[in-house]
Image: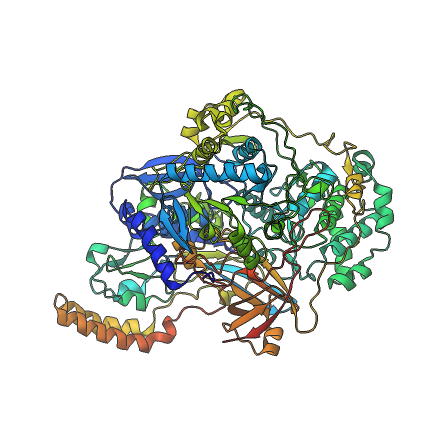
């Protein structure tokens, strides 16, 4: 068993977007669908302006809300730490897209399934590196097994200026000038997810298989979504693209 | 859409090209997706070279069922070391772009094209070239190119034809810095980015004009504690990432650098032994900068005098692992009237730091001696009698030899002086959107009797051609050997051409036969590459297998330079002979924004290359259009909000784009990225997306280098939506 994690060194990131495209190419994503992104943020008043680049992706939460709400168990937390999707079990209901606090999931219109960063789990299983880190010219992404004390990631997370996004598998090494508020927020389970677990999920499971079930599920999910919008919204900030 | 195209003619043209495309399997994004999703594990790995920009990193194309499904960096190539940028990662989407060219086309009417066979196209082009040569002399043909690996063949072709008029894009890109460093160092050094401890960039934006290998090194240097300082009127990505951003007034980097020299000499912070042994003209330089105090420069640059003094002292304290970048584009590549003197000041400053050949200083590339190809390439063409159309390398522009003044070509075509240019061949180049004043370029192209475009896509220039010759993409063709540092590398096809396209090697051979130059092109690319590799002990087979192989390279000579004196020329007689000050002196920029005006700045972005990637599905989605960066105070005064549509007007034209309201730019300047606002309707994603910078850039000619000085332009901005 491993405990996979990723550290992104934002002192190194150069906002080139290579990780974004390498990942899209690896998974054949539509051009407007991305598993990982890079955003530029700037703050201050001219001429005292500063800026930094921040990557986002699936945070591989310890208690992933996406898996909590998944009516079929297609989304799950693997024992190695990665949050994965078993596409054969995904019914395309998209509740996980709503539940994700990091807006890290996309819906594949062709395959009719939810998709997301898997830490390149299949590649990693073959001993290869995730596509984003493999192509990174800046060497900003360090991936590996935290349980292996001699791994690069285990050493890197102990470094100075490292911020762990609580409740997730993602760490950032942060430039001194970059405020915490520009990073993804600490993991928390949105309130509506508990509501979901208490009522909708059992109801959904009971109804699964019929058209009526899907319709009811959709209606309930939409209702809950608008309720939970605030906690589910992505982080704010100016993006240059 | 160009004025002469109605919607109807466009539709007709689309049908014509569509019919051609339908003959084979249509390249498409969905087709690529499907191929990569077959699930078969059988993947062929083909080492080759990227061409998503001019750097040409080593790649490994992963091929499944005859399709390129993914592209990775080649760990054996010194530029990529196994990594790629966003553009390199998006190479498949260029190969499978449904809008790309797949068969030769001939213009048969106003904006209308029909398919033509290669044989017919070559016969007709050859006959026309012979006819024009007989009437006007061989110099009536200009070949304009963005020089790639095949460039020596283009030179050879033009020499055989008898025309002196092979013209690159240097004037719009790097003429001024090349002249500056050639006159000071006899050659163009680079920076030892991996070991630099103090790095000053006068306008070079390393993070958005990307060189993969340089990024890897500068990131490593920063991680080791190097201090990076950016001079830029805008907080570019590099300026944001650097330790310090100095928002300098546009076109005044020269004053800043002169003041640094002043401080370093006045406070005796320079490397005295190095200066005494390795340079000439120190006393003249010392006299020249006597009055260029930090207080003087502060008034010109808008940078506080104490900051200038501090930077000078910090640079000197870090020497010799301290360097001022040798630049491209912005700063002193080509963008301002005074860029040669700015480059000369940077060159002199580096010399005072004694950094040539030192760890973390300036370096020359090692010397790889390729084999000779003269015997292979047929009888030596006779010396060309005609003068060049632009005077480059001649009495008027002695320092512009090999660089050219491509921005003057439209005026030359339109005026017919000093002699008529009737034919133009354009390869990997798109002057309609990469040279200043698009309208003038289009007017000139329409006056030509023969315009041939060689490209992988229907560029804005190709859309005006009489003949469009479709080149195979870099994933479908071989090319001449590349020298990359102390390695040699080779491009090879990863897949067969998808359509009826050819590599430029084949196109040049066919064109040579058609134009009566067969005896000069009686060789193949394989023979040519074998001849180049012969003395290196590396075979073509090895390169096809490895992609890149390290070879014995001679270390550069840092002591005996290729200048007239053999030393670093702080004082340059060559610059004096060309009409400039032999030591760097202050030369003001040509324009300054008045009340209600802005200086128009422009530059590259990380995810696009010039005008060549705007139709690439992945890269287009990342950045479909450019925006006008405008300072929040300036925007407020104009009533412009973030995202509003604005019109930008200069002396030559006006364009519209969305405003990006920001604190990250000087209030007297506005910025837009280059490479948007496509005018070719055949590139459907890119067509009319964002603003075409060239439409508002006037034709300028910088002193000494003849560079295009494209940032010497003021504009007004108004809200239109």
Task: Quadrant for the N terminus of chain B, please.
Answer: bottom left
The front one of B242 and B164 is B164
Q: Position of residue B267 (x, y in %)?
A: 84, 50
Residue placed furthest toward the front: B135
Colour style of the rendered protein structure: rainbow
**Side of A40 where B544 appears, left or right:** left
Residue occupying the point 25% across, 44% down: B39
Residue occupying the point 66% across, 70% down: B597
Residue occupying the point 65% across, 44% down: B196
**Can I make out residue A129 in this image?**
no
Q: Quadrant of residue A123?
A: top left
Q: Is residue A38 above or below residue B564?
A: below
The front one of B546 and B501 is B501
The front one of A3 and B147 is B147
Q: Is residue B305 above or below residue B140?
A: below
**Side of B688 where B535 appears, left or right:** right
Q: Is residue A74 above or below residue B473?
A: below
Number of numbered tags placed on the structure image: 0
Q: Position of residue B689 (x, y in %)?
A: 45, 62
Residue occupying the point 27% across, 45% down: B23
Q: Position of residue B670 (x, y in %)?
A: 60, 66
**Side of A117 where B708 appears, left or right:** right
Q: Position of residue B391 (x, y in %)?
A: 68, 43
**Side of B473 where B602 appears, left or right:** right
**Can I make out residue B414 in this image?**
yes
Q: Quadrant of residue A77?
A: bottom left
């Amino acid at each position: 068993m491993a405990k996979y994690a990723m550290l992104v060194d934002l002192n190194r990131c150069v906002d080139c977007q290579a990780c974004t495209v390498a990942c899209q190419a690896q998974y054949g994503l539509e051009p407007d669908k991305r598993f990982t992104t890079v955003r530029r943020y700037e703050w201050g008043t001219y001429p005292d302006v500063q800026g930094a680049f921040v990557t986002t992706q699936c945070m591989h939460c310890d208690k992933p809300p996406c898996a909590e709400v998944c009516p079929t168990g297609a989304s799950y937390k693997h024992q190695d730490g990665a949050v994965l999707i078993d596409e054969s079990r995904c019914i395309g209901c998209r509740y996980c897209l709503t539940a994700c606090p990091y807006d890290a999931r996309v819906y594949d219109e062709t395959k009719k399934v939810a998709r997301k960063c898997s830490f390149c789990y299949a590649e990693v299983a073959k001993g290869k590196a995730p596509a984003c880190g493999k192509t990174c010219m800046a060497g900003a992404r360090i991936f590996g097994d935290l349980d292996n004390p001699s791994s690069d990631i285990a050493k890197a997370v102990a470094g100075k200026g490292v911020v762990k996004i609580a409740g997730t598998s993602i760490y950032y090494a942060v430039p001194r000038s970059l405020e915490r508020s520009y990073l993804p927020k600490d993991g928390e389970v949105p309130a509506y997810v508990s509501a979901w677990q208490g009522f909708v999920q059992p109801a959904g499971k009971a109804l699964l298989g019929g058209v009526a079930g899907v319709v009811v599920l959709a209606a309930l999910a939409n209702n809950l979504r608008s309720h939970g919008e605030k906690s589910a919204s992505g982080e704010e900030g100016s993006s240059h693209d | 859409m160009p004025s002469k195209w109605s919607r109807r003619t466009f539709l007709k043209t689309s049908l014509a090209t569509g019919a051609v495309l339908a003959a084979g399997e249509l390249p498409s994004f969905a087709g690529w997706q499907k191929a990569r999703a077959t699930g078969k594990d059988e993947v062929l790995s083909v080492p080759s070279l990227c061409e998503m920009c001019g750097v040409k990193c080593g790649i490994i194309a992963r091929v499944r069922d005859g399709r390129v499904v993914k592209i990775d960096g080649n760990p054996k190539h010194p530029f990529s070391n196994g990594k790629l940028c966003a553009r390199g990662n998006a190479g498949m989407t260029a190969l499978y772009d449904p809008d790309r060219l797949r068969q030769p086309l001939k213009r048969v009417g106003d904006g209308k094209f029909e398919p033509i066979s290669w044989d017919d196209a070559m016969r007709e082009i050859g006959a026309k070239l012979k006819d024009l040569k007989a009437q006007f002399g061989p110099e009536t043909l200009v070949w304009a190119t963005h020089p790639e690996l095949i460039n020596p063949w283009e030179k050879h072709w033009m020499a055989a034809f008898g025309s002196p008029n092979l013209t690159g894009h240097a004037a719009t890109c790097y003429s001024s810095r090349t002249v500056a460093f050639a006159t000071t160092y006899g050659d163009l050094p680079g920076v030892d980015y991996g070991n630099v401890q103090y790095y000053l960039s006068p306008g070079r934006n390393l993070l958005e004009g990307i060189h993969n290998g340089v990024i890897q090194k500068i990131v490593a240097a920063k991680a080791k504690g190097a201090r990076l300082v950016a001079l830029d009127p805008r907080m570019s990505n590099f300026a944001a990432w650097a330790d310090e951003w100095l928002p300098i007034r546009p076109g005044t980097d020269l004053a800043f650098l002169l003041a640094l020299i002043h401080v370093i000499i006045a406070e005796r912070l320079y490397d005295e032994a190095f200066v005494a042994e390795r340079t000439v003209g120190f006393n003249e330089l010392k006299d020249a900068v006597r009055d260029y105090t930090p207080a003087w420069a502060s008034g010109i640059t808008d940078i506080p005098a104490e900051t200038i003094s501090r930077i000078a002292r910090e640079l000197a304290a870090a020497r010799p692992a301290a360097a001022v970048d040798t630049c491209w584009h912005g700063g002193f590549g080509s963008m301002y009237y005074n860029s040669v003197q700015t480059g000369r000041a940077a060159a002199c400053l580096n010399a005072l730091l004694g950094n040539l050949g030192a760890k973390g200083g300036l370096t020359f590339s090692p010397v790889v001696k390729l084999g000779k190809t003269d015997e292979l390439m047929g009888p030596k063409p006779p010396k060309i009698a005609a003068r060049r159309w632009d005077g480059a390398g001649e009495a008027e522009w002695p320092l512009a030899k090999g660089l050219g003044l491509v921005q003057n070509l439209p005026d030359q075509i339109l005026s017919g002086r000093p002699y008529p240019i009737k034919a133009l061949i354009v390869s990997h180049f798109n002057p309609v959107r990469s040279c200043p004043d698009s309208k003038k370029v289009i007017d000139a192209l329409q006056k030509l009797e023969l315009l041939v475009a060689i490209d992988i896509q229907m560029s804005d220039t190709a859309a005006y051609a009489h003949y469009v010759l479709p080149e195979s993409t870099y994933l479908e063709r071989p090319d001449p050997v590349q020298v990359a540092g102390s390695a040699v590398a080779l491009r090879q096809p990863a897949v067969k051409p998808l359509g009826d396209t050819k590599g430029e090697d084949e196109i040049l051979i066919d064109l040579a036969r058609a134009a009566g130059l067969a005896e000069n092109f009686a060789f193949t690319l394989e023979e040519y590459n074998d001849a180049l590799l012969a003395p290196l002990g590396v075979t073509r087979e090895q390169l096809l297998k490895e992609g890149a192989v390290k070879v014995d390279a001679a270390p550069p000579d840092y002591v005996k330079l290729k200048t007239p004196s053999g030393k670093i020329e702080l004082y340059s007689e060559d610059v004096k002979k060309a009409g400039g000050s032999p030591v760097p002196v202050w030369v003001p920029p040509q324009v300054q924004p008045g009340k209600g005006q802005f200086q128009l700045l422009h530059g590259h972005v990380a995810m696009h290359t010039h005008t060549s990637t705007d139709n690439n599905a992945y890269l287009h989605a990342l950045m479909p259009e450019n925006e006008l960066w405008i300072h929040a105070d300036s925007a407020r005064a104009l009533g412009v909000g973030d995202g509003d549509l604005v019109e930008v007007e200069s002396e030559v034209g006006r364009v519209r784009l969305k405003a990006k309201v920001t604190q990250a730019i000087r209030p007297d300047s506005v910025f837009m990225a280059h490479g948007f606002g496509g005018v070719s309707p055949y590139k459907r994603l890119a067509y009319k997306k964002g603003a075409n910078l060239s439409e508002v850039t006037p034709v300028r000619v910088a002193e000494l280098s003849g560079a295009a000085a494209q940032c010497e332009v003021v504009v007004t901005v108004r809200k239109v939506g």
